[in-house]
Amino acid sequence: MFKRLCVLVLMLVFIPLTSFANEEFMGLAEVEKLLTRGPVLAYFKTVSEGTTLQTYPITLKGVWKEMGMPIVVFTSKSFVVAGMSGSPVYVKSTDGKEKLLGALSYKLGEFMVGDQWGGITLITAMFAEESKSLPQVLVLGEISTRDTYPESFQYQDMTFISIPLGTMSVPPSVSDEMRLDASTVRLLQKKNFIMSTAPVQSTTATLTLPAKPNTLKAGMPIYVDLIDWEVNGKLISLGAMGTVTYISPEGRVYAFGHPFLKARSVKYLFRTCSVIGSVISEYDSFKIAGEKSEVLGAIQYDGSFGIYGTLGQHVIGGLKSIHVVTQKDAGPKIVSKITLARTPITQVLLAMTFSILGGASGAPMDDETSATEMAAVVSLAGHEPIKFSQSSSCTRQSFGPFLFNKSSYTNAYQKFLSDVYLPLSTSQFNFDIQRLDLSFKFFSRAQQTLALASFRFPNKISYKTNPVLELLLVNDDNTARFVKRVVVPIEWSKVEEPIYTVDTKDTEKKGEKTVNGRIELYTVESFKPLLSDSERNQEEPKYFLNATDFLTFFKKSLARTNQRLFAKLYVQRRSGLLDAAILNSDSLIPSDSHETEGWQLIPGGLQERRIPLLDELFIPVIVELPPIPAGYIISGVKISTSFEIVK
């Protein structure tokens, strides 16, 4: 029997779509005409327990019409709880025909004993919005405000709020780090999310549904997946639960009756589920989701008046795949596979996923001394993969009498999100991130930090002879040391030729005729602050020629981690070098350009990078030493010393 039902759900996409009922619908004018005669009896359908549709009577009381959007207000003897969003409401018209009025979408903002009040979004508004739901480009962290859907409204001195879609919100500890706008933060603070756990194998079967071809019906639960991840033989999912309002003969699904993330063009996979029961309390009232079916289709638009999608396996593919490997000390590796919905808050969802995965994988706690080594590979369509590695330690900050701790694991994944994922996902080049492969290794010990014990560099360098730099690093407890010898390449044709030899005494030299230089040693935290103007133009450009140019500089920036030590030489520039460069440079203005409103517009942009010629006395030479061995970081190095170039 169980296998037969599984086959029936799989057959859903192959059955004639004309098997869906051809319902009639009631618009605003008709319901207002009915209400002129007084309260109107109606009912809504939903599943309160198991998989059986139940009918609940309501009484239509009036229409709230401010902000340009009408909402039909009703009373009921039954409680309106989280998970009922989208429940279809039916009314008899004057000619006795039963018509679909709309979707349950609002409830009272406070607990009340006795008659329950609620609001209904008109199905005609949902139809109108769905018909205009053209794909739009998503912008990370931005929630669309181009609608008239009120988050709450007042009617007869009562406050109505949209019916929640879950029992949990995004923790402030996750959203605070994500550079989100105010409307997005408000949205994430709502209890619109559900987390569920089930054995992986159970998702290949379907729950006990009516043995009919049209398995999914109006009034049945719809569970929208934002994140699915498999770990330790379990499938953990984060999503939202509401109710199906209507299914068209073409297989289009209408649900919720109000926004989920208000993200416009999206891709959420959806299922149906059983309902264990409902919890009624003064604080939270909600349905409890039970066993979930396999994926039945995808939601493609998250609008002002509901969510809209399509039934069928043909719309399911194309979501991001994330593979994460975690390991604590020398323990076993835990492999997790994650599927992520396409939304404008993907970074927040990733942060929540990493946080939950950390708890399931034995990641260090905030107050625990620890170290985390992270490695990531980001696969982009049409480009070479981006690789990133970082060693992180736990941090502690005091604010007055308060102490704030953050684990090394939290620091590691937040570093990846802010420095890798965010720049790529918000770039003007619209990179298609197809897959993420990440590994986290946790160590139950303090981060091993190396200090610069000593270095050796000549104070006099023979002209046209590249100098040698020697370094000695030692760890915290002096149980290990690292040494490095590197030849520093200098472009001698640009360096002033000296007149003094190595044997010339300092007392015999004139200052303006001495060719001087300076060497600096520092770690990554000092790299950007110590860049000169010309270096900044070359290392941190303000524009990019194309996607490849962007990725070239991006990879270079990612390579500068706390496992690197940098050496920089400044050598005195040859006299007349800048004059010759300016004299031999081409004009910036092509001869065939035409003036437009005081400027000459040249279509097509730059084909090669142009670097401003600046009057700087010294030529910088940056030496990026190779990363130190895994398990160590270098911090706090900032040393400078001078040298002279001689014949």
Image (cartoon, helix red, strand yellow):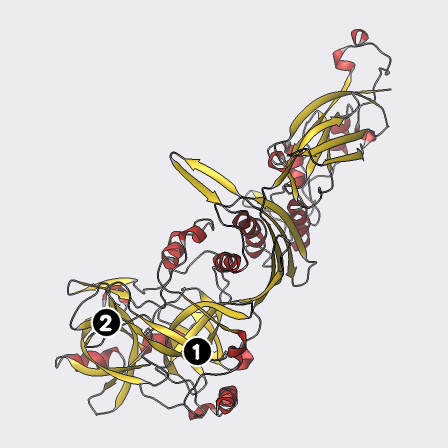
Q: Is residue 135 visible?
A: no
Q: Residue furthest left?
A: 37
The correct choice, above or below, for 509 with respect to 542 in the image is above
Q: Which mark is residue 426?
A: none
| Residue found at the far top of this picture | 507
Q: Amino acid at mark 1?
A: Glu
Q: Is residue 464 left or right of residue 526?
A: right
- What is the crowding at mark 2: few (fewer than 14 residues within 10 Å), some, or many (at least 20)? many
Q: At 71% across and 33% down in the image, what residue appears?
A: 473
Residue occupied by mark 1: 291
Percent from the top left, x then y, of residue 558?
64, 47
Label 2, on which residue? Answer: 118
Position of residue 264 in the picture relative to residue 393 (left or right) = left
Task: Identify the amino acid type marked 2.
Answer: Gly
Residue 118 appears anywhere in the view = yes
Residue at x 49% of width, y 56% of height: 355
* Residue 589 picture location, percent across and down: 67, 42
